Image (cartoon, coloured by chain):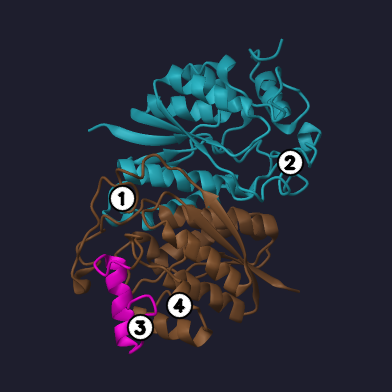
Chain colours: A cyan, B brown
Amino acid sequence: MTKRAVVLLSGGLDSATALYWAGKRGYRTSALTVDYGQRHRRELESARRLARAAGADLTTLSLDLPWLPDSTSLVGGSKPLPDIPVGRIGRNGIPSTYVPGRNTVFLSLALSFADARDAQAIVIGANTLDSSGYPDCRPAYLRAFEKAARLGSRAGVQQRPFRILAPLLRLDKKGIVKLATRLGVPLEKTWSCYRGGDTPCRRCDSCKLRAKGFNEAAQKDPLVH
Amino acid sequence: MTKRAVVLLSGGLDSATALYWAGKRGYRTSALTVDYGQRHRRELESARRLARAAGADLTTLSLDLPWLPDSTSLVGGSKPLPDIPVGRIGRNGIPSTYVPGRNTVFLSLALSFADARDAQAIVIGANTLDSSGYPDCRPAYLRAFEKAARLGSRAGVQQRPFRILAPLLRLDKKGIVKLATRLGVPLEKTWSCYRGGDTPCRRCDSCKLRAKGFNEAAQKDPLVH
């Protein structure tokens, strides 16, 4: 029987790696992308290109949450993006790039999709090391959500196997770059920069973490010239 | 300090009662309604009228989940609504009116809203007795979601109080009708029928459960003439 997984795909390095990981594990993958008005809408195009390259079907949802522009610097233009030295990312509490409840919203949409399609797993590229201090990337959170997802779904009631898989959870960015390379992720198709211009800004948290990963893995980032 | 709560308001009897309950408990209430393409879109207008009557601000979100039409009889016209004798509702497994992951999606949207606005609670009208056999109305599910919500939010990390409140969870429909009456819920503004015509169909699960509640409470349903 074909195993099916719904993969949350933002178009960034981490979710692209998660998508290829799931394919390698033998899952037939359905990618789910959410347009929530993020500044870096360019990642949506990256998600399309990555899904195509991986042979996954892609569903893009549009979500207009009117409270986001004044509660995160990732949506709307009213809050500036932070510019924190890389060693301090995640050390000063929750940064302004935190999108309230984002992973819970994304995982719940993936749960609805997975339960409708009898998929056995949701795959998410969350990672807790070298992450930006987001509460919804912590292992205990993901375990708790998995439990709720089982209890609140058809899969759980019918006692079919159902997992939330976060294969990058305990990897640092260096480890993610290495894993991505091993899995053949087309790194030039990924997009990480929060600013979403024509080229990565190299100043936002996401650019800095990505640069750290490529540097430590002694690899060249194909997006940086 | 004002306590704030986000209340999931569908426009039905249960969520209207939950909204008035929260107001009575001293919460300043923000109602959240989701248009997910339900057949009974008439309930969206009921939600507007109920929020206005209760003095709650109302946010209506639109959510287009392309997998719903072929996975629930509540969305699209391809699956017929069931017509089950009232005593057997919820006894034959999960009915076709189950919307995959619906409460998880709704609660996660409410969590995002609550975390953005520093609300202390989410209020949901879920009930497990006289419910339709939906997995995401069970007490253990709600407890598990509450735990995930705390772990995955700013409120939880900052150790501020945060609850998922389901005041109707262990009430039967009779008890809900009585509580609604005691709280002064304008019952004529609520809408329960899944068919969403001009008058309740009196045949769908939701109409039957509502009729049972009013009958057992020895009250007249203002929607039924």
Residue that label 2 marks? A73
Same subunit, tags 4 and 3: yes
Per the rendering, the mark at residue A178 is: none
Question: What kind of residue is marked 2?
Answer: Ser
The magenta segment:
B200-225
Check whether the beta carbons of the residues at disc 1 and disc 2 lie within 8 A of each other: no
Q: How crowded is mark 4: few (under 14 residues within 10 Å), some or many (20 or more)?
A: some
Distance CA(mark 2)–CA(mark 4)? 42 Å
Question: What kind of residue is marked 3?
Answer: Lys
Question: How far across and down, in percent of the image, does residue B52 sit?
Answer: 60, 69
Residue that label 4 marks? B187
Q: Is mark 4 on a helix, strand or loop?
A: helix
Residue that label 1 marks? B72
Residue that label 3 marks? B174
Q: Is residue A22 above or below residue B117?
A: above
* Image quadrant in which you'd find residue B197: bottom left
Q: In this view, does B81 lie above or below B171?
A: above
Distance CA(mark 4)–CA(mark 3)? 14 Å
The answer to whether residue A120 is left or right of residue B11 is left
Q: Tell me, yes or no, whether the highlighted magenta stretch contains residue B14.
A: no
Distance CA(mark 3)–CA(mark 2)? 47 Å
Q: Which of marks 4 and 3 is nearer the N terminus?
A: 3
Tell me the quadrant of the picture where the C terminus of chain B can be found. Answer: bottom left
Q: Which of marks 3 and 2 is in front?
A: 3
